[in-house]
Amino acid sequence: MPLTEASKATRPRESSGGFRPPLRGRVHGPRKVAGKLALLLLVLLAAATGSLAGLTLVYSVDLPQIADLERYKPLATTELYDLHGQLFGSFAMERRNVVQYDDFPPILRQAVISIEDKNFESHWGVNLFRVLGAAYHDLTSHGRAQGASTLTMQLARNLFLSPDRTFRRKLQEVFLSIQIEHSFTKQQIFTLYGNQIYLGHGVYGFEGGANYYFSKPARELTLPEAALLAGLPKGPVAYSPILNPERAFRRRNTVLNAMLEDGAITAGQANEAKGAPLGLHLAPPPNSVAPWFVEEVRRELERQFGTETVHEAGLKVYTTLDMSLQQTANRGVLDGLAAYERRHGWRGHLLNVLAAGESLENFRHPDWSLPITQGAYFHGMVVGVLDGRVTVKISDARLGLQPDGWAWTGEKDPAKLFKVGDIVYVRIDSSLSDPVLHGTLEQDSGAQGALMAVDNGTGDVLAMVGGRDFNLSQFNRATQAERQTGSSFKPYVYTAAIENGATPQESIADSPVTFQTAGGPYTPHDYEPNYLGNMTLEKAFAESRNIPALRLAERVGMRKVIDVAHRFGITRDIPPYLPVALGSVEVTLAQQVAAYSSFPNDGVRVTPHLLRRVTNADGMTLSEDQAEVNESTSAQTARTMLMLMQQVTANGTGAAAAALHHPLGGKTGTTSDFTDAWFLGFSPSVTCGVWMGYDTRQSLGDKETGARAALPIWMDFMQAADAGKDEERFPGD
């Protein structure tokens, strides 16, 4: 329909450019674009949030709960203490000494923070600047990945995560670090880190590191020592001061520079510390003082508590050992073996490293792990024979042998005794403080010795030596070796006779005799080729005459003798044959020592034991040893035997012991062909037994009796054991 004038009048007026209807898109265009962008950003943010939440769920689903860390206790070292509270041994899967925050000295804390995490006190577990910087370095350098872990991240990784360098592990490390920072103070985090970090050579934690590398607690560390330890976490092997001392030196000085940059030390302190030597003072290997005793303790602890607890739970084990007496025992056995070797002259036949196809540079003897101390015995390797002087290598040290050091061999020309590569046995005569080590040539023919000592009243095992060298043989000849006892079995024969009415002053014949036994006629002989005729039981016992002992055994019956031996603690089955009275039965040294302790104890035998008390890491008592007490014989019989055994050390076969001028008693023992040499004896407070022989049961040599081979070792020990006990007396005296 055509427009009328009226309709035209109602139509909106057009502009000069003509009429255009209002378009929403044209009027509101910027708002529409902004809305789309906002929507897109919201979608992306939601996707990122969802992805992050998903990643968090995926990668944190198997993370430990923070409650696990609150209950976490690092694997700790089980420590062994002697009866005076002195630490002497330990067991551990990870060698660690757990301490509190204040036990880490400020200089050590600052050294660690300066080199490992400068912003430790201010960040929230993750240092984004370090992470981004490390990422940029990795992208631009195409080289080795650069570390960006904070102390908290290192703690999270070491405690709960694998060392794999993967995106998954790194993300888990970040999540866990944030949780740790949220739940623990900085002091608590540093304490956990300081007790957990690995420092090489099986050592964990800074306290353990201070003990191992410097033989001191962490609180006593000097600046250069603290810097050395602080530099180890980055590469415990690469920067080991033992394996790579030059790299360790440079790494330590890098730590000192970092501390200087942070203003933690002055330039003068830094320069002085950087010029200091590494100053290592390595702790002796654990358990090296009383290795056979420690091994017996380990078996007992594992029987009571299980292997895992013993090696991981940080038990405190209070033992019966007396460290001072143990060291006396160690020295006495080795000195006694050395004296025996010299009596039989130089045998030579040295093993040679080069002849065995090994190199001088790579050879290391097992006993080179022990600290070199004056009076110690070592196997060394000859590395030089020149101008009448022999140079011997012992670990990283060099020892000089002079002509007087081998004069006992009878050979003057060292070239006829030694050649390069020979393994020689030497005694250290000088201390490490001397400019040059000096020693004496000794000999190791394979002869072995053992010693065990107990407190008569408590049964505490005070000292134990199971052989010549634990590094070469862990077999314990004090507790595991059953050897013929020889005349040291005779006290059971005489005890049976006294219980049956015999008296010390009654007469008995030392004369030729043939006994009729189930195996046929038996004609014994004395050690000495003569017969002394009628004599008292007291004299027959003191002189260890065989015929009187056999006459007594026949009189009371061998079954009675065997019953006495069993009451005294000899556990093995003993055949009722007359020759057993002279010691053809095999018994351990430990059983003999326990049995002999009954005599000075009025017939009461307190079973020897190694442990007094065991506590957990928090000090709670887990077990406390109760002495097992048994009556071996009556007090009257024990005192009569005591009188007989005192005669042995006064004017009998053990008369050399009279030089100690102390109340003593005991008995020698020597087996056929001088295969075993024994001396077992006691003072009012201590019983000690010594054995010498070869594992192969070959002869020790002519006239190597108990009095000659074993008694001198016993005397060395008992002199120390009875020191300061001038007033003690036997029961009844």
Image (cartoon, helix red, strand yellow):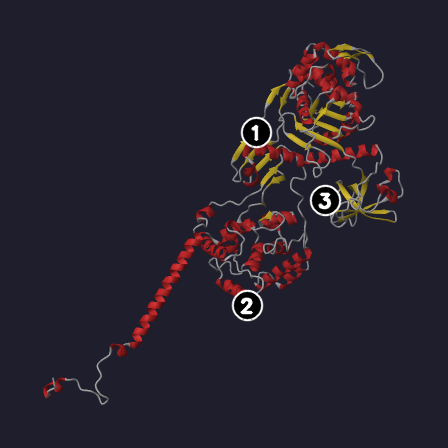
Q: Nearer the viewer, residue 132 or 268?
A: 132
Question: Does residue 724 show up?
Answer: no
Q: Give the distance between the C-alpha atoms of the residues marked 2 and 1, in whole angstroms.
A: 67 Å
Q: Quadrant of the N terminus?
A: bottom left
Q: Give the distance between the C-alpha atoms of the residues marked 3 and 2, in whole angstroms.
A: 49 Å
Instruction: Give the quarter of the image for residue 110.
Output: bottom right
Image point 67% across, 37% down: which residue? 291
Specify the farthest residue to the front: 1
Image point 75% across, 20% down: which residue? 487
Few, some or many residues within 10 Å of mark 3 (<14, 14–19, 20+) = some
Q: Give the distance between the C-alpha atoms of the residues marked 3 and 1, in whole angstroms.
A: 36 Å
Q: Which residue is mark 3?
A: 368
Q: Which residue is mark 1?
A: 625
Name the kind of residue labelled 2 in the image: Thr
Count the marks: 3
The x and y percentages for residue 196 are: 55, 49
Instruction: Give the quarter of the image for residue 695.
Output: top right
Q: Nearer the viewer, residue 275 or 352?
A: 352
The x and y percentages for residue 185 are: 47, 53
Question: Does residue 673 show up?
Answer: yes
Q: Which residue is mark 2?
A: 140
Name the kind of residue labelled 3 in the image: Trp
The x and y percentages for residue 365 are: 73, 43
Mark 3 vs 1: CB contact within 8 A: no
* 509 up-or-down from 448: above or below: above
